Amino acid sequence: MNTSQIAQTLKNLIDPLTAQPYAHEKNIHAISFAGGKLVCTIALPYACSSLHPGIKAQMDAALLGMAGVEVADVQLSTQIIAHALGQGTQLIPGVRNLIAVASGKGGVGKSTTAVNLALALQYEGAKVGLLDADIYGPSLPHMLGVNAKPELNADKMMLPLTPFGLQVNSIGLLIPPEKASAWRGPMATGTLDQLLKQTLWSDLDYLIVDMPPGTGDIQLTMAQRAPVTGAVIVTTPQNVALLDAVKGINLFQTVRTPILGVVENMAVYTCTACGHQEHIFGQEGGQKLAEGAGCEVLGHMPLKPAIREQSDKGVPTLVQDPSSEESRLYREMARKIGAKVALLGKNYSDKFPTIAVQ
């Protein structure tokens, strides 16, 4: 019994998120076959632990069709690798993939989305960090209920805080909450560079970066100089939000950063008294935006007071109400993002020397 035989048997089991077989020769490990019992480990390329029982059941059933197999036991694991980066960028130590969560304008729920997507990826089995890159209006400390200042190690590296198991850093943890960050572009971008590269991130599959709204210095610096694996664009269906979101997409596409998808927030409001649904900010705006960008809508999030209330309390939706429909939607979007990252090319930046032109 070998990997080729197992892969051939499982080739018709297709992952709907990647449109590729779950199993292939390179991700099948630790095969044992004795007394009619076949045991093997298959490493999936993105975090989707909530789906493992269903995938395992399909694989076990398929392997029982192999000659001599009386008992099949597939053990699923997750192996997330670093993926292709923009030209001239290097991986950040301790971070395999950096995902920017961006919006064209403020007030569309970008930070709420970043927090809950990070928690959803963690829920699915990934190791996740969260960086607040909104230098002028940091909100993650409040949303996560933290206010302690990061400690420094002997090498003067900041140790991230770990609310709800995430590795987190923010300028909001370093300055008083009431103090305005009245900084010009170079100072702001320098601060972001320090937060990104002088935080001791540890073995992260994904670092989610909550970007400031718009397309200014910080966004351009992040897109050009940071190792951004891909970007998630957050918008509402409203035309005004869409006009600005297009600019954000164009910025990332200009520097050849993949757009992983669009999150449409405040898609529909359901009256708590009568159940009537109303599209307060319009309909299908996120779909039109995604079509124009050549990507897909990752999800349509409803306008619900509970999401705002949970953020205001410092206990995000994924933590406060993990069984809610909103949490299910966040986890679904997280799996889609992980799958899209898994389809990108492998990163080889650490295999080549840095070349200095004199």
Image (cartoon, rainbow, N blue to C red):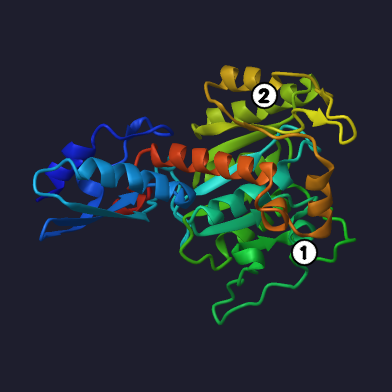
Badge 2 marks a residue whose secondary structure is helix
Asked whether, in this view, residue 7 is left or right of residue 237, the answer is: left
Asked whether, in this view, residue 47 is left or right of residue 11, the answer is: right
- Residue at horizontal 34%, vertical 48%? 56
- Residue at horizontal 59%, vertical 22%? 290
Q: Quadrant of residue 155?
A: bottom right
Question: How far is disc 2 from disc 1 in space, using C-alphas?
Answer: 30 Å
Residue 225, given in percent of the width and then of the height, sits at: 54, 46
Packing grade of label 1 (10 A; few <14, some 14-19, many >=20) is some
- Residue at horizontal 73%, vertical 60%? 144
Q: Amino acid at mark 2?
A: Gly
Q: Which residue is the site of mark 2?
A: 286
- Residue at horizontal 49%, vertical 59%? 204
Q: Which residue is the site of mark 1?
A: 145
Badge 1 marks a residue whose secondary structure is loop
Which of these two is toward me, 333 or 59? 59
Q: Quadrant of residue 8?
A: top left
Residue 215, given in percent of the width and then of the height, sits at: 69, 34
Packing grade of label 2 (10 A; few <14, some 14-19, many >=20) is many
Position of 138 relative to 266 (above/below): below
Which of these two is toward me, 90 or 73? 73
Which of these two is toward me, 183 or 340? 340
Position of 146 relative to 270 (above/below): below
Q: Earlier in the sequence, mark 2 or mark 1?
A: 1
Q: Amino acid at mark 1?
A: Gly
Q: Is residue 86 visible?
A: no
Residue 7, given in percent of the width and then of the height, sits at: 19, 41
Q: Count the labels in the image.
A: 2
Asked whether, in this view, residue 204 is left or right of residue 69, the answer is: right
